[in-house]
Amino acid sequence: MKGRISQTNQEPASGGIFYGWIVVAVAALVLVVTSGTRAAPGALLLDMERDTGWSTSQLSFAAAIGLVAYGFGGPIAGALARRIGMKNMVMLSIAVTALSFYLASRIDDIWTLTLWFGLTSGLAAGLVASFLGAAVANTWFVERRGLVTGVFGASQSAGQLVFVRFFAGVGAGAGWRQALVWGAVASAALLPIVWLFFRNAPADVGVAPLGGEPEPATPPDRDLVRRAFRRPEFWLLASTFLVCGATSNGLVGQHFIAHAADHGFDEITAANWLAIMGVFNFIGTVGSGILTDRYDPRRLLMIYYGFRGVSLMMLPFIHDSLSIGAFAVLFGLDYIATVPPTIMLGAKLFGRHNAGVVYAWVFGAHQIGAAVAAWAAGLVRDETGSYSWAFTSAGAIAIAAGFAALLISDRSNGSDRSDSNDLVNVS
């Protein structure tokens, strides 16, 4: 057929490497840095309290606004990508993130901090947070999609955890304002990399998706969100992912360092343990992607949430370095392992081409959970002087989410734009 790209034409002029892997590398780097900027509130919380006199709950509220904005940047990203292209949307996200961090470093009141450090930087980073990984995985790959989504999930949460050490170190030495300036510099450094190496789709470099035939462009499915909202499977998927956000980014990501300080650990040591979580999170989420290609994602979610719940219930009783180190390793393996099976279920239910949009909305629920947990945990600490109640109740909710995941159907109802080739086999 005229103009048809051969399925076997999957090696562009880049040394025999399928160009999709280069796009994956660039997108993963973007996710590491932009999601890493969301580690700043948790890493700089105590230094901000000392320097400004603002309370834990005030600073937690600013962080919560950022988490909500971060989550709902995804649906906006889908519309922007259709209008200006995915590459331009990514560059816009990076530029606004860098600018908002720089402006946040110059503020002198809590409401301006909430505007730049919370709302604007959160929304800018959120443009790529949920949409980019799912869109790249489903545009460039038919085979190895679970592995690719695992890499992106690991990059996103590992960025938040590893950057904790960066922000905490700079904040301890030069103060939280200088830490934000360096966050702006790290974000801006991504712009030339994206400009040179990122591509929107396989057709841009004359190849087919890995393991699949080239596909004709499909018009936007404008009815998708309304159909999704009518299905109970969507709400089960969103509600379980809401619990994921509450128990990871919201609670542990924002308050682990302060909790450890309450138990006698210094801030840098606690940040180091959080960074170790990031290392093992990368291993756990990539492994989860591989498992998602082979096993029923609903059963994986039950295991992940159950293990997370037990871990959180144990955290208030940890007071020594050996135990907190074991927690960092084990919780890190499970920190965001829920991402690959969640994306896979969304693709199975609503079609591969709709996975990015569906996941963007589900990720919004994730960040609502994160925001509520971040703010509520700050209130609990202000009122009781301890995080114990916050961690134990979060553990119980996580276990309940594991059982709820088993109730999610993994079958399309036939009205969504998917076919048998879009669906993965499950055990």
Image: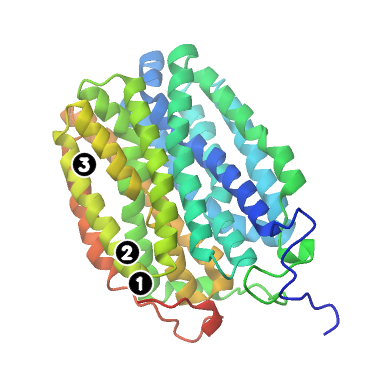
- Specify whether 349 is left or right of 16: left
Figure check: 45 above or below 92: above
Give the residue drawn at x 34%, y 43%. 332
- Residue type pointed to by label 1: Asp
| Tag 3: amino acid | Phe
Residue 40 in picture, x, y percent from top left: 46, 30
Mark sitting earlier along the chain (3/2): 2
**Callout 3–callout 2 Cβ contact below 8 Å:** no
- The residue type indicated by label 2 comes to Leu
Q: Secondary structure at mark 3?
A: helix
Picture quarter containing residue 405?
A: bottom left
Q: Which residue is mark 1?
A: 296
Q: Is residue 110 above or below residue 331?
A: above
Residue that numbered label 2 is attached to: 300
Residue at 56% from the left image edge and 38% from the top image edge? 33
Note whether residue 419 is visible.
no
| Dot 2 alpha-carbon crowd within 10 angstroms: few under 14, some 14 to 19, many 20 or more | many
Looking at the picture, tell me which residue is in the foreground, 12 or 319: 12
Residue 391 bears which disc, if any? 3
Furthest toward the front, the residue is 16
Q: Name the spot of residue 287 as percent of width and height, x first.
A: 41, 55
Q: Nearer the viewer, mark 1 or mark 3?
A: 1
Q: Is residue 222 visible?
A: yes
Residue at image x 46%, y 64%? 343
